[in-house]
Image (cartoon, rainbow, N blue to C red):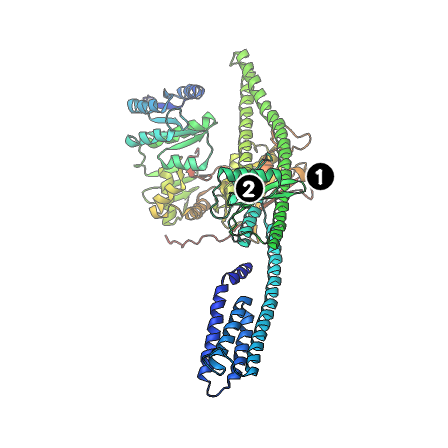
Amino acid sequence: MTVPQTVLIIDDELQIRRFLRVTLEADGYKVIEAATGQDGIVQAAMSHPSVVILDLGLPDINGMEVLAKIREWSSMTVIILSVQDSEQEKIAVLDAGADDYVVKPFGIGELLARIRVATRHAQPIQEAQEFRNGHLCVDLVHRIVKVHDEAVKLTATEYALLMLFIKHAGKVLTHRQILKEVWGPHAVEETQYLRIYMAQLRKKLEADSMQTRLFLTESGVGYRMILLDS
Amino acid sequence: MRITKYTRFHRLQWQNYLYALGFVVAVAVLCHLASAVIDYRSVGMFFLFIISLLALISGPGPVLMAAALSAFIWNFFFIPPRMTINIHDFSDALMVGMYFFIALMGGILTARVREREMAVRHREEQTSALYNLAKEINQAGSLDDIIQTAIQQLSLLFNAPAALFLLNDVNQLEDTPRASGEFVLSDAEWEAALWVFRNRRIAGWKTKMYPALEILYFPLYTSNGAVGVVGVRLKEALKPEEESQLETFLHQIAVAIERELLRNTVAKAKLMTESERLHKTLLNSVSHELRTPLATITGASSSLLQLNDAANPNWKLLVEDIFSASQRLNRLVKNLLDMSRLESGMVKLHLEWSDIEDLVRVVTRDLDSELADHTIHLEMDPHLPFVRLDFVLMQQVLANILLNAALHTPSGTHVRVCARVEEHNLRIEIEDNGPGFPPQSIAHIFEKFYRLPASSAGGTGLGLSIARGFVEAHGGTITAQNCEKKGARFIILIPVEIAPPAIEEEIE
């Protein structure tokens, strides 16, 4: 039996906090609540939660400020809730260090999946020798990529791109983050590179089935590698 | 403007006296130098020649002066006995007398002809200025342009700063005139302008009313009433012909302003009725669309409270109803937000090189549950190049059309999405094998709040209208038609740049 993970909910809406608490507790998490940004920062510092669910529209201070404050001293998982379905905002919070975002209104299933992915990453997986995800299998030591047990040849850049997705599997990566990691800081505006390589990578790695896709386009924001059930 | 040449000519009159003096003295000196070879009588001919030349370039004043001076010089320096004004020979005296008379008459006549020609030219210039004004005012697209042109032309024509006070919405004179150059309005001047506006008579500078002011005010009016006031800071009083020209001018301006004011009023009235109609439709449609899912949520959740038993087999059904009603509500809110973005002109394209296949897949995945009962076929051109478009907006366009198909076709319907690029256009076709459109509806389906007669609940009447708005924001078109056999078809054509960014090939 492991110690239950703690989730801190920072949201001023009582109803939202309530349904999150009910579901999260049923899912085995320990839940702490904060109704204001200031209180949220204090709670985050005091109880060191594994996950912070942070609403952007707080009554006292902007959620972005809370995020910045938390990021000053901690890399704990932060998932943003927002009523604004705007790509610019999503990119801004992700680039500011948020791990993921969910737009209100949202289904609880979506949020739980995001929490699971984000917390999975909190544990180191670097020592793994092999990465398996659905029909994809990557031998991390010998750099061999297999789709349906058939070896696929990737170029150096494609492989670097794939490694980045594997490192952050399930997590959304903004165009900027990917370009910076794979092509370097000078290339952060060259989104067309990314689109071309993504198309190539998909051609080589995606199964033909229409619904199960490894790489999900988060339109206007970036890409996410889905964790498929094997 | 040519008219300014005329005024310059008058201002430089004193220079003509200098020319006259210079000519006469120069001829006298030349004749003196050549006195060994020319007879003193021919000197008079030279003078006469010079004077007739002079008459061509100057007015009667300098000619008179030159005639008198040359007669004197000729007599004094050339006609014997020299250095006296006496003339011994009677025929010489007669000659000087006649010389003076001919020089004078010739010079004055020439000058008068010239003067008349100048007047004709001046009138011509006035006519052409008037014509220019009329032309420019007619070309002016807006009220602001008309006023700008009027002020500009007035100040050019009278070489004086001008200002224009306009009638405002509530039929009062605006106290902030549009002016050329600086035009500071004092209380007295504002009072004068108001007086002119009310009485439709000239006032201000050197008139009976408000004579102390430096500005002369003219009313701008048509047969339907006053539309404004023009103030001009004149340097000298107007000549009668200038006054009549100004009057014609002002009338032209007044008519143009009135026309534009009327047009604005009509446009405003039209807009009012249009927005009122829209408001009504919006209220009707939105209140219906909002209330339906709200009724479900309220009803189902209150039933749950009543039942108070999670084991009841209907419990889950009611919860599912609440969930789907809230999703429908959410869709409506999104549509309304998109619509208001479109209507307020807030849609800014964020163009980026996009993979159309990816676009279509994102859309079909997002609508996974809505399209669960339909079969989707994708027919993508395998060589489809990347095209520049706004990925997020186009995603919305395709989603709205597919959602439309999901709502209006029975389950089991096939939906085909195909995309290709032809002649610099991205062409996306979405067709189903459902019942198709009723023929009379095709023309209206992109209209706001238009719903097919007897269509099932769930739509907002906004989705297709938004789709069209976003496609048009790309400079493209969207059309609907019935398929040859059966079903509905949407065709989206978007002009796109097709220059896939080159990337160097890599070798592993």
Residue B346 picture location, percent across and down: 51, 38
B255 versus B282 height, above or below: below
The residue lying toward the viewer, choosing from B405 and A210, is B405
- Tell me if residue B33 can be seen: yes
Marks 2/1: CA distance? 56 Å
B222 versus B240 height, above or below: above
Dot 2: element: strand
Quarter-of-image position of residue B268: top right
The residue type indicated by label 2 comes to Phe
Give the total number of marks visible in the rendering: 2
Question: Label 1 marks which chain's residue?
Answer: B
The residue type indicated by label 1 comes to Pro
Question: Label 2 marks which chain's residue?
Answer: B
Which residue is the site of mark 1?
Answer: B439
Residue B348 picture location, percent across and down: 50, 42
Q: Badge 1 local density, few (<14 within 10 Å), some, or many (20+)?
A: few
Marks 2 and 1 share the same chain: yes
The residue lying toward the viewer, choosing from A118 and B354, is B354
Label 2 with label 1: CB-CB less than 8 Å: no
Which residue is the site of mark 2?
Answer: B165
Report the residue that reaches farthest toward the right.
B440
